[in-house]
Amino acid sequence: MKESDRKKVHEASLDVLETVGIRVMSKDARAALKDAGAEVDDSSAVVKFPEGLVDSLMRTVPSKIVLAGRTKEHDLPLDGTHHYYTTDGCGIYTWDQKTQTRNESVLADITKTAIIGDGLPYLSIYEPMVVANDVPSKIHVLSGVREAMRNTSKHIETESTTTPDEARAQVRMAAEVVGSAEEMRKRHYISAMVCTISPLVLDAGATDAAMVWADNHVPVHITGMASMGLSGPATIGGALTVNHAETLALACAMQARSPGAPALYGSVQSSMDARTGAYNSGSPETILLSIGNVEMAKHCRMPCSAGGTGGSSRIPGLRASIENAVLSPPLAAVGSEVMNGIGLADGSTLLSYEQMILDHEIVGLILNSHRAIEIDDDSLALDLIKKVGIGGTYLAEMHTLKNVRGFYSPMLWDMSPFESWVAGGKKDLMDVALEKAQKILSDHKPEPLDADKTKALDEIVAGV
């Protein structure tokens, strides 16, 4: 997008917020916005933003933050120069490849995928991937976060928080892990996805939770999901405008509540299927919308958490892998910093351990093909080129031995000759992926969480 196009979308969104407004179901958010100068009608819950208010509030959104790991080796600077991938969430089924059936997801699936995620080198953020249907619904979210904190040292993104009490409990959990509430404010060990409701609604529970996140400076991935032709206009520009208005509204509510609260422009928009109206996250329009969201994040100077993997294939396998391999590269090319999210199919509802490994391989290819090309004396290798000369070979050179170690090496693909592949049993890729997942579960040992901290997490969850 040209800068002039970004400006047009931004100004159209400001017009919407000033003239139409947005329904804010959270009393706390409405109160904060009213104090900041917004026009609030409590009877309808509609909030309108007078000219200049949005831009004034948005000035306090941090343009750069660090998403911290439990250990500092997993800290993730969001400064416009990095690309990171998350797991996907929050599914309700798991896939059995052998029987080709779906089963209800359970807490053990979160435990296992957290361990696998901890062991995957190109995965940077773990988001609890499924609902734990075998625990009481009131502790679904907290149980998933607890398993994540116990089984990975990477940054944790929490999803599906629907009450401020859930948010407060997670803040206490994060503070226990990093050492104190003050340390948690400085080290953003957890972040939270908060979805807007298109068109132009901020619902009560999630927005109340966002106020808690803001108070405690937990970064919020503001995730608008306006679907072209359904919950947003059937044009790229119109859908971006609705989404941008929602994103600005929640970001402004957070800043009105707590200036400087970190927020990410985290949209995951899509188109509907023109024949059925169904959710279609694997379309070319989805890619264009995601690119547009990255551009609007840049316009607002906000950290970006837009797009990524997660197509509409009903089951894991070929189609899901093709969609994910097509969806992600354009987003990496335009500079999306946090990209959602490996391992789920069927509109992010179906966990597949095989797809988790397949997606990770795709992510590895993308990240390694979007590296900066470094040109210096060593990479030019001019003296070596002169030494080898015409018709020689570089195979036996020390320069080759040193540099070949940095080549991308597939974790999953079989690079052996055809005859060797046949002799090895001609394994189906899905079978190989499951074997790889099982091997990680068997061999990888995450850095254990301190026993006292584990006990404290259990007590917080039990006390809800």
Image (cartoon, helix red, strand yellow):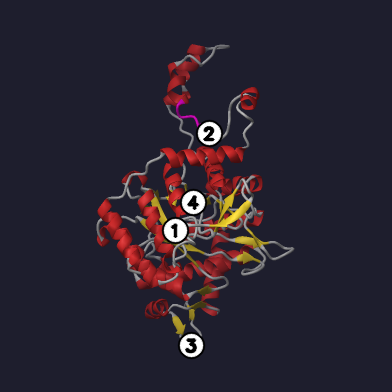
Residue that mark 1 sits on: 301
Tell me the quarter of the picture where residue 416 sits. top right
Please, what secondary structure does the residue beneath circle 1 have? Answer: loop
**Is residue 376 shown above or below 282?**
above
Q: Earlier in the sequence, mark 2 or mark 1?
A: 1
In depth, the one of 395 and 167 nearer the eye is 167
Q: Residue at x 62, y 63 (%)?
A: 237
Place of residue 452 in the rendered image (x, y in percent of width and height, measured from the top left): 25, 54
Quick one: quadrant of the C terminus?
bottom left
Three-letter code, disc 4: Thr
Mark 3 → mark 4, Cα distance in angstroms: 40 Å
Give the label, 2 or 3, closer to the camera.
Answer: 2
**Is residue 440 shown above or below 127?**
above
Residue 327 is inside the magenta segment: no
Place of residue 89 in the rendered image (x, y in percent of width and height, measured from the top left): 50, 57
Three-letter code, disc 3: Ser
Mark 4 → mark 1, Cα distance in angstroms: 25 Å
In the rendered structure, are the residues bearing label 3 and label 1 in contact, judged by CB atoms less than 8 Å apart?
Answer: no
**Residue 87: mark in rendering:** 4
Q: Earlier in the sequence, mark 4 or mark 1?
A: 4
Task: From the viewer's perspective, tell me whether residue 240 is left or right of residue 380.
Answer: right
Residue that mark 2 sits on: 410
Tell me the quarter of the picture where residue 347 sits. bottom right
- Give the magenta-colored segment's residue range: 405-409
**Residue 43: mark in rendering:** 3
Three-letter code, disc 1: Arg
Please, what secondary structure does the residue beneath circle 2 have? Answer: loop
- Quick one: label 2, few (<14), some, or many (20+) residues within 10 Å? few
